[in-house]
Image (cartoon, rainbow, N blue to C red):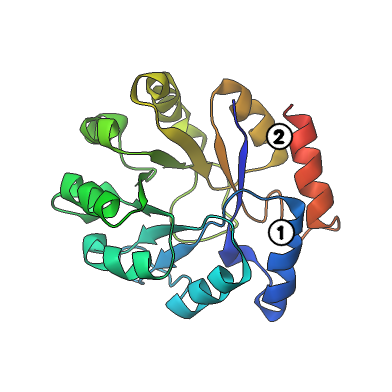
């Protein structure tokens, strides 16, 4: 099973962003995770279009857009034009989430759903045949540095069990420690969003951290 490591760029050092991205590229990360927040759907503001474009110009690696915003469908073309490869949206932010998935695909991007802590497996199950990625939030959306919410594990196990049937790539986002990666990759999670729990703000360099995580999960 493939292990995907995706740094959460809201946790990067923006004073040295070009250097950070260069080091992450050299470390062999798989995809850049970009949190877009509007201060309405979640009580925080996230990365700006200018931030997105800056990082897009610094890497050839895939970049996602995790849209924690109201009415995400109206911004699909906007993110396609920024060079986004994958769009995650929250199904409860849309009146017609199935149409949003179709529009993402029509714009040439992969479609993913972000499943918040309060969103059930059953409420999004009908979307699973049409999506490429599922991102299960393991913290409440909006802020870095929160503890892992263990109550989401039964739901995560439902997505693990359904993954073979529907063929999506399954990821988690929030308090992703190296211990959690080892535990949950073995269980069936593919993609790990790396923030301050495993990657940023550590004494070790990115190359060492990413290499060690891959060795731990061979």
- Residue drawn at x 40%, y 39% as measured from the top left: 134
Q: List x then y, in percent, for residue 169.
A: 46, 35
The residue mark sitting in front, 1 or 2, is 1
In front of the other: 61 or 9? 61
Q: Which residue is mark 2?
A: 179
- Residue drawn at x 43%, y 61% as measured from the top left: 84
Q: List x then y, in percent, for residue 78.
A: 32, 70
Helix, strand or loop under label 2: helix
- Label of residue 207 in the image: none
- Residue drawn at x 45%, y 24% as measured from the top left: 160
Tell me the quarter of the image containing the N terminus.
Answer: top right
Compared with 185, 25 (above or below) is below
Q: List x then y, in percent, for residue 88.
A: 37, 51
Q: In the image, is 127 to the left or to the right of 207?
A: left
Q: Check contact, mark 1 vs mark 2: CB within 8 A.
A: no
Helix, strand or loop under label 1: helix
Q: Which residue is mark 1?
A: 24
Tell me the quarter of the image containing the C terminus.
Answer: top right
Mark 1 crowd level (few <14, some 14–19, many ≥20, 10 Å Cα) = many
Residue 200 seen in this snapshot: no
Q: In the image, is 197 to the left or to the right of 175?
A: right
Label 1, label 2: how far apart the Cα atoms are: 21 Å
Q: List x then y, in percent, for residue 144.
A: 56, 59
Q: Quadrant of residue 36?
A: bottom left
In front of the other: 27 or 195? 27
């Amino acid at each position: 099973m493939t292990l995907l490591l995706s740094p959460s760029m809201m946790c990067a050092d923006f004073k040295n962003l070009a250097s950070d991205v260069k080091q992450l590229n050299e470390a062999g990360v798989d995809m850049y995770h970009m949190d877009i927040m509007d201060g309405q759907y979640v009580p925080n503001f996230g990365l700006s279009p200018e931030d997105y474009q800056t990082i897009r110009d610094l890497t050839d690696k895939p970049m996602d857009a995790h849209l924690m915003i109201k009415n995400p469908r109206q911004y699909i073309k906007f993110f396609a034009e920024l060079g986004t490869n994958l769009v995650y949206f929250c199904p409860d932010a849309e009146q017609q989430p199935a149409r949003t998935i179709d529009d993402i695909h029509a714009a040439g991007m992969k479609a993913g759903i972000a499943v918040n802590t309060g969103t059930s497996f059953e409420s999004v199950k009908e979307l699973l045949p049409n999506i490429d990625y599922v991102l299960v939030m393991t913290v409440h959306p909006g802020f870095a540095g929160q503890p892992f919410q263990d109550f989401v594990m039964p739901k995560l196990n439902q997505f693990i069990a359904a993954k073979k049937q529907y063929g999506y790539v399954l990821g988690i986002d929030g308090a992703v420690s190296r211990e959690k990666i080892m535990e949950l990759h073995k269980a069936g999670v593919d993609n790990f969003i790396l923030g301050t729990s495993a990657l940023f703000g550590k004494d070790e360099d990115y190359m060492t951290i990413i290499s060690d995580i891959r060795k731990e999960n061979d």
